[in-house]
Amino acid sequence: MAPYSTFMLSAALSILLNLSVLAVFIVVIVTVVRRHRPDAVPPLLGAVIAELLIAVLSFVGSTVLSRVVGAAAYADYYAAQTAVFALAGAAARGLFLWGIVRLARPPEHAG
């Protein structure tokens, strides 16, 4: 079994990569998408921000609780966290799909 420090390094690198990709999504949404299709920005940005919050809360929750509680309590927490974040992730991806559908439709021009 890998030492705890290896596990933490792997988790930290994983969250750093995830947050970096989400930051790129945010930049593209608030620059390119907003310029060409502002109607698609709210669901896309909402989805990416939700994914960002899920990633941070999951990492912080796992890191803190792994140090504070015992193995049995951590397993119970991890099971609950997985279910809650799976539902939240599904909702975020639903928002993202809504934004993609808006992008796929021709823009509605007033006037």
Image (cartoon, grey):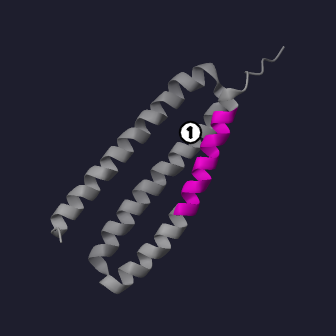
The amino acid marked with disc number 1 is Leu
Magenta stretch encompasses residue 37? no
Q: Position of residue 110 (x, y in %)?
A: 81, 18
In the rendered structure, the answer to whether residue 17 lies left or right of residue 83 reads left
Q: Secondary structure at mark 1?
A: helix
Q: Residue at x 31, y 51 (%)?
A: 14
**Looking at the picture, does residue 73 appear above or below residue 65?**
below
Q: Which residue is mark 1?
A: 45
Quarter where residue 70 is shown = bottom left
Q: Is residue 23 above or below residue 12?
A: above
x, y percentage for residue 61? Answer: 38, 67
Residues 75 and 35: in front is: 75
Seen in the image, is 78 located left or right of residue 88? left
Q: Residue at x 47, y 56 (%)?
A: 54
On the image, the x and y values in percent for residue 16 come to: 31, 47
What residue is drawn where x is 78% and y is 17%? Answer: 109
Q: Which corner quadrant holds the C terminus? A: top right
Left or right of residue 99: residue 30 = left
Q: Quadrant of residue 89?
A: bottom right
Residue 48 spot, x, y in % from top left: 52, 43
Query: Start and end of the magenta stretch?
Result: 86-101
**Is 22 drawn above or below residue 2 in the view shown?**
above
